[in-house]
């Protein structure tokens, strides 16, 4: 068998001579820092969930009908009559939420260890483009089941574009293809969700990984691995303190894969809706433009950004400032490499002010998530009794919005004016205790 595989490898290499060098460059001869920790699982896990979403999505499209009259019924048909259809659908819906959880944690790791800093600015920008396309992909996929929340969620979110001066009304009609979400909306969202955006997403992922492998991976110390043979036994050309990505980190990533699959299996088989967080009850009702849900709210991973729209007061009878703030909350992340001017990358060696500010930023993000999902409307009466829920919710939400944007303002001032007192950074990457 070894001769068979060897001959097959020689046959392939002879016909595609560039494949083996590419494999070596990105796998066996790509030397990653030896001190990766738990936070470095989430990049590979994001790729795993992306592949799972594409595969399950392909099977769902085989029985889906992208029309206002047939979309909801086709989803019910998948759930009830297609063999194992319920499993494929729950895998896809659970995978969507797990995708965002993994991506949020992956982005947070980049922030705490300074992975957006020189020379990895392009890696960060490509990652943020992936996040932007992922949000568009998720929104269009959220509309496709054509439940009542899907319909009204589509109407509310698309209507936000109507706040744009001059072209807003025409832009909304162009996106919907009609005056209300309907057949045209479903057809174009289906085409974008199934074909166009996955292609863009895959291209950006390839570019993201290629850019990363050109400059090398960051690590928990934020120190680039040194070149030369010191401290490295694998190759005279290998950087010191680096180990081959394959087989060492590919095997290590399998631990994270197994753990994520256990969590996913538990959710899929025991709590696929997760109390309405992954699948809302209103989406079990067919879309009806005459019956508005009691609360129109987006799925949880859009809720922090939707909360910002709600919390910014209207000015001169227009909500355009809320929409600008919502998009600004995403695009400000693109500017991280230029807002943070600290010479130190990793949070391990950064000043106390940065650590406090980052903690407040995380609290603000979670607080906005609670406001966007109306969780605060349940918590406030429980904690404070008979009070004006709207007043306190708005006060809390606006405070969280100010803290969210305040983090970026503080980060720029804190590092630009040299207020940060950092710790000494080691010359070489440190090992685990």
Image: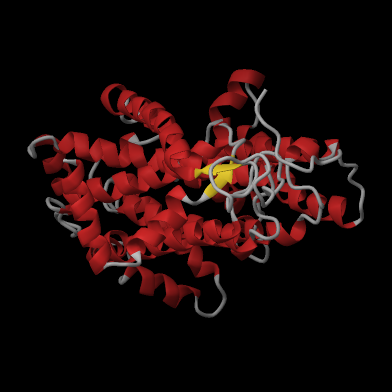
Where residue 387 sits, quadrant-wise, is: top right
Whether residue 287 is visible, yes or no, is no
Image quadrant in which you'd find residue 174: bottom left
> Up-down: is 314 above or below 243?
below
The number of callouts visible is 0
Q: Position of residue 303 (x, y in %)?
A: 51, 44
The residue shown at (64%, 61%) is 121
> Considering depth in this image, is 355 or 154 the residue closer to the camera?
355
The percent position of residue 317, horizontal first and vertical second, equals 62, 64
In the image, residue 423 lies at what x, y percent?
A: 86, 38
Q: Residue at x 35, y 67 (%)?
A: 18
The residue drawn where x is 50% and y is 51% is 30
Q: Is residue 313 left or right of residue 100?
A: right
Vertical position of residue 170 compared to residue 38: above or below: below
Q: Picture coordinates of residue 221 (x, y %)?
A: 71, 40
Residue beneath the point at 41% across and 34% down: 251
Which corner quadrant of the image does residue 354 belong to?
A: top right
Q: Can residue 415 be seen by looking at this rendering?
A: yes
Left or right: where does residue 257 sit relative to residue 127?
left
Tell which residue pokes out farthest to the bottom in this image: 166
| Quadrant (top left, top right, bottom left, bottom right) of the N terminus | top left
> Quadrant where the C terminus lies?
top right
Q: Is residue 232 left or right of residue 395?
A: left
Q: Nearer the viewer, residue 316 or 360?
A: 360
Q: What colouring does the structure picture have?
A: secondary structure
């Amino acid at each position: 068998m070894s001769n068979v595989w060897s001959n097959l490898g020689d046959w392939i290499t002879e016909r595609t001579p560039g494949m083996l060098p590419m494999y070596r460059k990105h796998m066996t001869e790509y030397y990653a820092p030896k001190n990766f920790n738990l936070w470095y699982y989430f990049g590979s896990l994001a790729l795993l969930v992306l592949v799972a979403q594409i595969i399950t999505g392909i099977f769902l499209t085989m029985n889906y009908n992208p029309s206002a009259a047939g979309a909801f019924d086709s989803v019910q048909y998948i759930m009830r009559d297609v063999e194992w259809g319920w499993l494929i659908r729950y895998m896809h819906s659970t995978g969507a939420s797990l995708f965002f959880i993994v991506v949020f944690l992956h982005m947070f790791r980049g922030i705490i260890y300074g992975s957006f800093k020189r020379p990895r600015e392009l890696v960060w920008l490509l990652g943020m483009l992936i996040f932007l396309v992922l949000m568009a992909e998720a929104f269009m996929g959220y509309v496709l089941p054509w439940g009542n929340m899907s319909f009204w969620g589509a109407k509310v979110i698309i209507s936000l574009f109507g706040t744009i001066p001059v072209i807003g009304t025409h832009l909304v009609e162009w996106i919907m293809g009609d005056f209300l979400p309907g057949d045209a909306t479903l057809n174009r969202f289906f085409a974008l969700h199934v074909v166009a955006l996955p292609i863009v997403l895959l291209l950006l992922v390839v570019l993201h990984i290629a850019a990363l492998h050109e400059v090398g991976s960051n690590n928990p110390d934020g120190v680039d691995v040194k070149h030369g043979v010191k401290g490295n036994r694998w190759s005279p050309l290998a950087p010191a303190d680096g180990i081959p990505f394959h087989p060492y980190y590919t095997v290590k990533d399998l631990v994270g894969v197994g753990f994520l699959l256990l969590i996913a299996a538990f959710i899929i088989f025991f709590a696929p809706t997760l109390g309405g967080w992954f699948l809302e009850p209103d989406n079990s009702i067919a879309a009806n433009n005459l019956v508005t849900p009691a609360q129109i709210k987006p799925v949880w991973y859009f809720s922090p950004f939707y909360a910002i729209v709600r919390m910014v007061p209207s000015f001169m009878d227009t909500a355009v400032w809320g929409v600008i703030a919502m998009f600004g909350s995403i695009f400000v992340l693109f500017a991280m490499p230029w807002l943070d001017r600290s010479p130190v990358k990793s949070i391990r060696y950064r000043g106390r002010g940065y650590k406090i500010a980052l903690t407040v930023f995380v609290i603000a993000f979670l607080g906005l998530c609670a406001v966007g999902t109306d969780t605060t409307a349940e918590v406030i009466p429980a904690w404070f009794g008979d009070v004006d829920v709207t007043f306190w919710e708005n006060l809390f939400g606006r405070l969280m919005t100010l803290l969210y944007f305040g983090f970026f303002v503080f980060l720029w001032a804190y590092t630009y004016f040299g207020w940060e007192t950092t710790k000494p950074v080691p010359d070489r990457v440190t090992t685990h205790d």
